Amino acid sequence: MQGALRSFWSHGNIVKNAVLQHIRPMTPLMQPVMFSRFESVTAARMEEQGFESTTISDVLKAKGKSADGSWLWCTTDDSVYEAVKSMTHHNVGALVVVKPGEKEALAGIITERDYLRKIIVQGRSSKSTKVGDIMTEENKLTTVTPDTKVLRAMQLMTDNRIRHIPVVDGKGMIGMVSIGDVVRAVVSEHREELDRLNAFIQGGY
């Protein structure tokens, strides 16, 4: 997955640069006029249109509160068995862990990886082990805010080799996004970006 992300990232830049090649001036005499038009139009219009500007807040809004694990959680006192059962039922790979009675007080995160490494491999019982005993604790988590750009979130997930990242604001936990959510958002943004460049080439701006 990490290799695929790096390949996608590189491919996206190659495609973007290839498109930009088509609108570069062909002769020195044309350069001042064409560069001036490109600079004034693209810098203003494309920034206005949201050139690489999708944020985690946009991703959460697209997911909805009940979709793909945005608001799925368990407590530190729940059994690992119940947590894994919930993940299986909702077809997600991780749950946010909160303190009992404090839904927005982030305590950590539990993932399929935690279950495999700390329960299955070690031969422990999922029914008698609490989530709080195997979760990744809050102080060790990589998090993002609603204002974080999706490209930054993707970079964080790639660098830290993680597939889920909690979203927090000044008041506490507000959701979670997966690598799949981020990749879909990046693909959509690059598609829109190329459409805008194509419209510029064809005189749409």
Image (cartoon, rainbow, N blue to C red):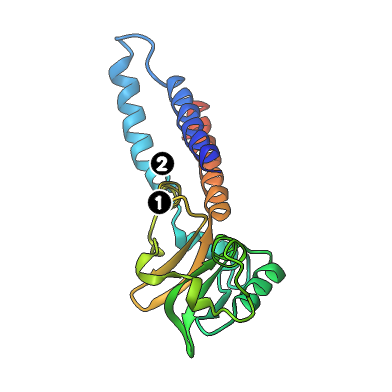
Element carrying mark 2: helix
88 and 68: which is toward the camera: 88
Residue 44 image-quadrant placement: top left
Q: CA distance from mark 2 to mark 1?
A: 25 Å
In the picture, the quarter occupied by the N terminus is top right
Look at 59% across and 61% down and name the residue there: 121
Residue 116, relative to residue 138: is it above or below? above
142 and 11: which is toward the camera: 142
Residue 148, relative to residue 134: is it above or below? above
183 and 157: which is toward the camera: 157
Residue 44 visible from this viewpoint: yes
Q: Which residue is mark 2?
A: 46
Whichever of labels 2 and 1 marks the residue nearer the N terminus, that label is 2
| Amino acid type for the residue under numbered disc 2 | Met
- Please, which residue is most extreme toward the front here? 123
- Please, which residue is most extreme toward the right here? 89
156 and 20: which is toward the camera: 156
Element carrying mark 1: helix
- The local crowd at label 2, few if under 14, some if 14 to 19, many if 20 or more residues have their Cα within 10 Å, is some
Q: Position of residue 114 (x, y in %)?
A: 54, 64
Q: Is 166 situated left or right of 34 in this image?
A: right
Number of marks present in the image shown: 2
**Of tags 2 and 1, which is closer to the observer?**
1
Q: Position of residue 3 (x, y in %)?
A: 52, 37
Q: Which residue is mark 1?
A: 156
Q: Which mark is residue 184?
A: none
